[in-house]
Amino acid sequence: MTPIVLLDRLKEFIEMSIKDVILPSRNSEPRAAKVYKGNLPNKEAETKQVPYILIRFITGKDDQLSGEMTDSECRVRIIVVTYSDDGEEGYINTLNLITRIRIALLKERVIGDQFLLKMPLEYIVYEDDTDHYHIGEMMTIWNIPAIEREVCGIWQ
């Protein structure tokens, strides 16, 4: 359940970090980007829900070096999608959201009192021509609480 809790806490954190960034939307008044875990509600939402942010679990890893404590981590991709008729404005809006999230994460470093942001923190704004849609993403790595073995004795 831990990666799911991480996604929940990240969603709350990102919503608070960007709530005052009002952006053009495709089919309604300008508004703050909506944040979704995993995927959009449906395929049609890809264009109708813009601006939006997706938070996606990518991979997890549990590791233990000899004599060390168990280390658990997971990678989460944060995808930012904005809309604008003006290519320059759309590019800057995407970069603005990524920068807001980046600064907030680097200031805080710990989310939900249990998830520690690890370095490096990578981010990109794509230069693709997507007809008024502008996309960027961040790749984050998180230390998550490790699962401790409950059976001891002969298995050690």
Image (spheres, grey):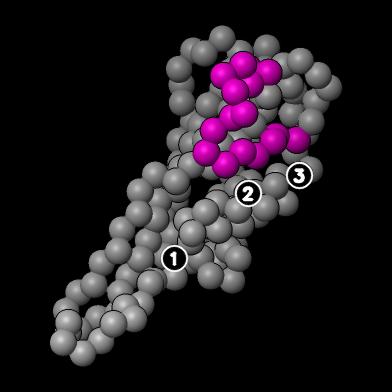
* Residue 22 rendering spot, x and y as whole percentages: 78, 33
Alpha carbon of mark 3 to alpha carbon of mark 2: how far? 12 Å
Left or right: 25, with 70 as reference point: right
Amino acid type of the residue that numbered disc 2 sits on in the rendered structure: Lys
* Furthest residue in direction bottom, as rendered: 153
* Residue 84 rendering spot, x and y as whole percentages: 67, 17
Disc nearest the viewer among 3 and 2: 2
Query: Does residue 84 sit above or below 145 in this rendering?
Result: above
Q: Which mark is residue 114?
A: none
* Residue 1 rendering spot, x and y as whole percentages: 49, 59
Alpha carbon of mark 1 to alpha carbon of mark 2: how far? 16 Å
Amino acid type of the residue that numbered disc 3 sits on in the rendered structure: Lys
Secondary structure of the residue carrying numbered label 3 = loop
Q: Which image quadrant is residue 24 in?
A: top right
Q: Which mark is residue 144?
A: 1
Q: Which image quadrant is residue 147 in?
A: bottom left
Q: Earlier in the sequence, mark 3 or mark 2?
A: 2
Left or right: 24, with 127 as reference point: right
Q: Which residue does the numbered mark 2 point to in the structure image?
A: 11
Secondary structure of the residue carrying numbered label 2 = helix
* Magenta stretch encompasses residue 45: yes
Quadrant location, the C terminus: bottom left
* Magenta stretch encompasses residue 117: no
Query: Does residue 115 sit above or below 28 in this rendering?
Result: below
Give the residues in magenta: 32-48
Mark 3 packing: few (<14 Cα in 10 Å), some, or many (20+)?
Answer: few
Q: Which mark is residue 19?
A: 3
Disc nearest the viewer among 1 and 3: 1
The answer to whether any part of residue 79 appears in the image is: yes
